[in-house]
Structures are given as structure tokens and as C-alpha cells.
Image: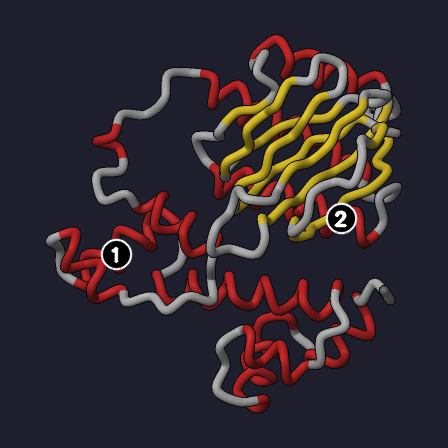
Amino acid sequence: MYFDDLEFANSVYRFFSTDSSAFFVMKCNSMEFIRSGHIQLVRKSDNRVIDLTAPAFYWLHQGASYRYIVSGLNPGHKYSEHIFVDFRGARSSRMLAALDELYPEGMFHPQDPEEVSRVFFRLLQLYRSNPKENLPEMGALTERLMYLAYASAEKSPAESDDPYHLDKIAEQIRSDPFAAYDFHRIARQLEISDDHFRRIFQKKHRLTPHAYLHHQRMFRATELLTTTHMRIKEIVYNCKFANMMDFSRSFKRYSGMSPRDYRRKHGSGL
């Protein structure tokens, strides 16, 4: 088969909050994405510190040693959002060699972080489902990431391509979705109407500002349900919902099941 030289070993979505206690050795090659926040990666081979301010796409080589630094980098924020896919095989090594040649610094800021994010989350979904059966699509998605890497290596878009700083607004929402956002005030600061702000934001990010904010909060709710022991009432409070009924109704519309059932099905058991 076309993708016989590729094997997927892991895919994880998590939140960084502490430094690595020591260097770790990679058992596979890996493509990784800091979706929000800021961390640093220390590469043991040359003691190089790679600064990863979101959105940041980077990669780790099988057999190499690395360490993460988080402390002191995100004042006012508790975490950085991180998603990655581990894979091995000759194709994965060729991909990382091409990335090294394209970006000797070991990372890049993608021109289309929303598309990169969508690809990584699709890989996560397929891995959780059945990585062997989903190998062709997962392989094609890694090649899509390579295309996005090459596209980002071209000349960066001019500031006029995003005159209202919509990417920065979206990144801020991703970084801290539980903050209070006044989109009417933001529109006034941009000197445009609320309707125009809503239209241009939706055109660029596929959702209205309020829907985008809600989507990010629900994303965090799923992770709190599956990766922590927080009580559902605590999650309701953290996700800024008025009450349990409002949260349960919204969560079911978002995921297709109740928060309790989602935790039973997808919880890590940690």
C-alpha cells in the first residue's frame, strides 16, 4: 500500500502547565502544534532553546532528547494548548528532514493556523477511532501538513491582508476563552460597525465571534471532562455557564451526548 512506510503511534491534545522535570528521549518522530500560549523547547544535542509562541508548528526527531520550559512564560495564564501526532517509518523521517531543511530554526508560525489546527484535530479524531483502519486518511493529512509548511515558507502576507487583526483576536480567544469579551467594544476600537465586524470575522474564521468563543469554551470543557477529575459542577463554573442545565444542554448540542456520558466514553481514567 502507498502508506505502508508510515505507522502512527500516538496523538494527544493537552494543556502545558509545568516544565519537564528532565530531558526525555523521543521514541518516534513527531509533528506538534502549540495552538495557544507560549512554551520553550530545549534541544539537548546543541542546547538550543526554541521559542514556541502560538501559533507554532514544530517537530521532534526519534532518538533525540528534549525538555520543555513553561514557568514564567505566560503571566496571567495557567496553560499553553498543545496537540501532536507521533509517527514512525521512512516517510516520517523524510518529512522531518524536509522540515529541517525548510526551517533550520526547528519551528515556524503557519500562515493559516486555523487550517493547521483543523488538520491536527482530525488526526486526533482518527487516531482515537482506529489508527490502522484510518491509515490512508491520516497519511494524507500529514502530507497536508507538509503542504501547509511549504506554503508558510513563501513570502508572509502583508499586514493589509488582515487590517483588522482578526487572527490576533482569534488567537487571544483561543489563549483565554474564559475571559469576558466585549465584541461591541472591539468593533468600536476597530472603527467599524458590529455587523461588519461579525461578517468579516465569520468570513475569515468560519464562525461569528460569539460562536467562535462558545466553540473554544466547549473545546476546553471536553478536555476538562476527559483529562481531569474535576467535578462537572466545577467545570460548569470554569467554563462560565450560568448553571448545570445550561451547560448540559449546550454540551449535548456540541458533542451529541451528556457531559457524564462523554466522560464515561472518552475519559482517560487518570
Mark 2 surroundings: few (<14), some (14-19) or many (≥20) residues within 10 A? some
Mark 1 surroundings: few (<14), some (14-19) or many (≥20) residues within 10 A? some
Name which residue type carries label 1. Arg
Q: Nearer the viewer, residue 165 or 78?
A: 78
Relative to 49, 129 lies left or right = right
Name which quarter of the figure residue 179 lies in. Answer: bottom left
Furthest residue to the top?
101
Query: Which residue is found at the position 42% from the left and 56% from the top?
Result: 173
Q: Nearer the viewer, residue 40 or 124?
A: 40
Relative to 203, 32 lies left or right = right
Disc number for residue 126: 2
SS class, disc 2: helix
Name which residue type carries label 2. Leu
SS class, disc 1: helix
Do residues under tags 2 and 1 come within 8 Å of each other at their CB atoms?
no
Query: Which residue is found at the position 32% from the left and 25% from the top?
Result: 157
Residue 170 locus on image (x, y percent)? 39, 51
Name which quarter of the figure residue 263 lies in. Answer: bottom right
Query: Which residue is found at the position 88% from the left and 41% from the top?
Result: 132
Above or below residue 80? Residue 184 is below
Disc number for residue 199: 1
Instruction: Count all numbered tags in the image, as a single digit.
Output: 2
Above or below residue 227? Residue 9 is above
Residue 197 locus on image (x, y percent)? 22, 56
Furthest residue to the left?
191
Q: Nearer the viewer, residue 223 or 48?
A: 48
Q: Is residue 1 visible?
A: no
Query: Which residue is found at the position 23% from the left and 44% from the top?
Result: 164
Q: Is residue 227 visible?
A: yes
Q: Quadrant of the C terminus?
A: bottom right
Colour setting: secondary structure
Residue 52 locus on image (x, y percent)? 55, 33
